[in-house]
Amino acid sequence: PAGRRAAGRGARRRAGAGKLSGSGFNAGGGGTGESGDAPLTDPSDAYMSRQPWELSAEEMLPAARALRARGASHLERGDFEHAERACEHALRFVEYEDAFDGAEAKADARRVKLECLVDVSACALERGDAQKAARVAEAALIVDPSSADATLRRAFALAAASAFDGAVADAEKAAALAPGDARVAAERARVLAMRDEAYHAFAPKLVPDPLRPAVSAPLNKQPVPLFHARIP
């Protein structure tokens, strides 16, 4: 739980930063509006109740961008449920890169997809779903294997599941992918701190009792030593 909270604090700090795109990730049922929302004030309000087949090709990318911005805003405020819902709905509009004409439009769709997947992973981890967080981070890495943000999201998901070997490996990889990036360096340090905290919490259970014989022996005999010293 402490690891998930730590990972989430980093996610809120970096909401809106560059992220990744994902391929092969079906965003699920999509949005149908959010309870308790304010009155319609921005384009994303209308898009939450729309489906990709209801829009023209020219509207798809603006819809995804508006929904991604909506999700980032919710994430920044700590509203992970609505942030996740908005980003997952945005993914429906950029799921198929071939739907966009031109290299620039395809690259923009891929970038929005990456950003949404990174935020969905962060939200899932905040809600305690490390498995989904890891799965979505994997989808992001399929889209962009060189994304430091996607690699960090997988690192935090693995750390939350106590898979620290993989978590540390991903944190080190992210730092190598973004050398000189202070934010990535700080996130790497947090993953290592999570590993160390877990180790120190578990280490006392591994310390042997000095009063207990190293090898069991009959009660009327001395404990059998593990090694016999050889006199020089």
Image (cartoon, rainbow, N blue to C red):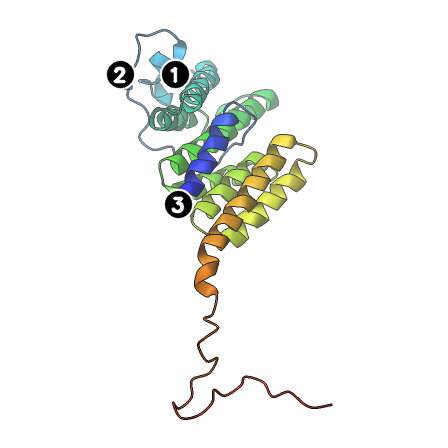
Specify the quadrant that holds the C terminus.
bottom right
Could you tell which of marks 3 and 1 lies nearer the N-terminus?
Answer: 1
> How dense is the environment of label 1, judged by Cα within 10 Å: few (below 14), some, or many (20 and up)?
few
Report whether 14 appears left or right of 217: right
Report the number of discs. Answer: 3
Report whether 189 appears left or right of 156: right
Q: Secondary structure at mark 2?
A: loop
Residue at 40% over, 43% down:
130
| CA distance separating discs 2 and 1 | 26 Å
In the current view of this chain or complex, which residue is farthest to the right? 232
Q: Amino acid at mark 1?
A: Leu
Residue at 50% over, 25% down:
15
Give the residue at mark 2. Answer: 36
- Closer-to-camera residue (43/56): 43
Q: Which mark is residue 131?
A: 3
Using the rendered image of the protein, determine whether residue 134 is visible from the camera's viewpoint.
yes
Measured along the vertical axis of the image, is residue 129 above or below residue 83? Answer: below
Q: Position of residue 143 (x, y in %)?
A: 54, 36
Closer mark to the observer between disc 3 and disc 1 = 3
Give the residue at mark 1. Answer: 55
Closer mark to the observer between disc 2 and disc 1 = 2
Using the rendered image of the protein, determine whether residue 98 is visible from the camera's viewpoint.
no
Could you tell which of marks 3 and 2 lies nearer the N-terminus?
Answer: 2
Task: Kindly indicate the quadrant of the structure image that contains residue 228.
Answer: bottom right
Task: Kindly indicate the quadrant of the structure image that contains residue 151.
Answer: top right
Could you tell which of marks 2 and 1 lies nearer the N-terminus?
Answer: 2
Measured along the vertical axis of the image, is residue 228 above or below residue 166? Answer: below
Q: Amino acid at mark 3?
A: Gln
